[in-house]
Amino acid sequence: MPLYDADEALLSDLNRITRQTKDRLRSLAVENEKNEALWRRERRTLKERIQRLDRDIERVNYEMLSEKARLLTKISELSFANQNRKAELVEMKLALRLSREELLRNKTEKKRQTVLRDSSCCICIKHMREPAALPCGHVFCASCLRTALSTKMECPMCRKAVASANKVIKLFF
Ligand SMILES: [Zn+2]
Ligand SMILES: [Zn+2]
């Protein structure tokens, strides 16, 4: 092959390679731009999702804190109410005890008064004064009984003998 022809062939090869390389570079550039656009879009989407998640997290946090505060308030309200109820219960118990004692006192007093009112001495036929009983069970005024016994040592009612004046029992209502 003559030298000239060889140069021509070399030059032609060079041109072809240059052209191919340029084409390849161009297509790479286009592809790169496409990829970059895709990547930018992807990045934007991801950023938006992150922002949405951040907002969601903030909202959920806020809701949880509100709920927590509400529950704490409820707990303190309940324990306050419970304390009040306990105090009320203690007061009621005390009042009940006092009124029961009062009732008992009233009952005893009424009984005493009834016994005194309903009993009259069968010696003086009057309301009993300082009641005194004999072992037979009969009751008279202490002074009436003393007088009766000074005459005869027996019960003015049933005539049962009385051994001694020491057998007289003073009654207290
Ligand atoms: Zn009497
Ligand atoms: Zn008697």
Image (tube, rainbow, N blue to C red):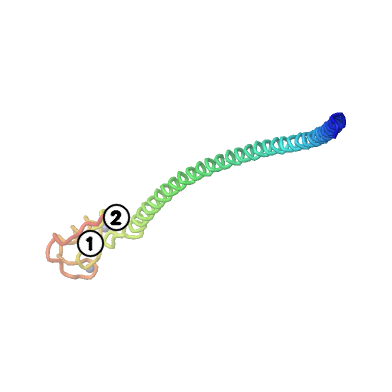
Question: Could you say which is closer to the camera, residue 52 or residue 169?
Answer: 52
- Mark 1 to mark 2 CA distance (whole Å): 13 Å
Nearer mark to the viewer, of 1 and 2: 2
Q: Residue flagged by tag 2: what amino acid is it?
A: Phe
Q: Residue at x 19, y 61 (%)?
A: 148
Q: Quadrant of the N terminus?
A: top right
Residue 99 placed where, x, y %?
A: 42, 50
Other-residue count near label 2 (Cα within 10 Å), few / some / many at <14 / 14–19 / ≥20: few
Residue 69 placed where, x, y %?
A: 58, 38
Residue at disc 2, secondary structure: loop
Residue at disc 1, secondary structure: strand
Residue 39 placed where, x, y %?
A: 75, 36
Drawn side of residue 115 relative to residue 42, left or right = left
Q: Earlier in the sequence, mark 1 or mark 2?
A: 1
Q: What residue is pinned by disc 1?
A: 133
Q: What residue is pinned by disc 2?
A: 173
